[in-house]
Amino acid sequence: MNPYGPNGLPYPLPIHPNLVHLTVGLVVIAIAFDIAGAFYPIERRLFRFLALPVTRSALHDVGWYNLLAGVVTAFFTVAAGLYEMLLAEPLPGVTSAFGLGSLDTMLWHGVGGAVLLLLLTAMAVWRGYQRFAWRRDMGRQVQWSYLLAGVGLVVVLAVHGTLGAQLAAEFGVHIAAGQLLQAGADLTTALP
C-alpha cells in the first residue's frame, strides 16, 4: 500500500480530475461559441427586452476568452496529471475495455495529455492570429478550417478522457473508495 494513504497521494483528494473537467468545459464552450458566432447571421442586438445583448462579436469574444482560460488551466491539468500518475498504483491483472493493461493505458493517457496540451496551445495561437490579424475587420472571426479542427479536438478530448476514466474506474487509480474497499477498510472512518 502506498505510504500516502488511500488515494496514494500526499493530499486527500486528487486534483487532476477536477482540473480536467474545468479544462474540457472551457474548451468545449470556446468551440461551441465560435461555431455559434460563425453561424449567427446578424450584427444587431437580440433579446433586447431581456437586456441580453447578443451579437456575433460577443459570441466570438466568449469563444476567445474561454479558449485562453482553457489553455491556462490545461497546463495545470497536465502537470497535476503527470504528478499523480507517478504515484499511481493500478490494480494488477486488469484489462480495460480498450484491451489495454494499466501501464499501457497510463502511457497513452500521459503522452496524449502532453500532445493535447500542445494542440490546444497551437489552437489558441491560431485563434489569436485570426482575432487580431487575419480576420479582425470581418464579422466572422474564425475560419471554417479552425472550426473543423476545433470539433476534431473535442472528439480527441473525448477519447482521451475515456482513457482517464478507465484508469479510475477499471484500474482503481486514485479512487479512495475503491482502494479502501479492496483493502477491506471501513469507508466511514477511513476518509477525512
Image (cartoon, helix red, strand yellow):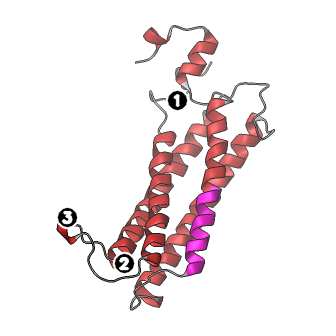
Along the polypeptide, which appears first: circle 1 or circle 3? 1
Along the polypeptide, which appears first: circle 3 or circle 2? 3
Residue at (40% x, 18% y) in the render: 192
Task: Write down the residue under mark 2.
Answer: 56
Q: Position of residue 174 (x, y in %)?
A: 57, 29
Badge nearest the viewer, 1 or 2:
2
Q: Position of residue 137 (x, y in %)?
A: 38, 92
Are discs 3 and 2 less than 8 Å apart at CB? no
- Residue 88 visible: no
Task: Write down the residue under mark 3.
Answer: 50
Q: Is residue 31 above or below residue 164?
A: below
- The amino acid type, in three-letter code, at marker 2 is Arg
The kind of secondary structure element at disc 2 is helix
What span is in magenta? 144-156
| Residue 131 belongs to magenta span | no
Residue at (60% x, 19% y) in the render: 179
Which labelled disc corresponds to residue 9?
1
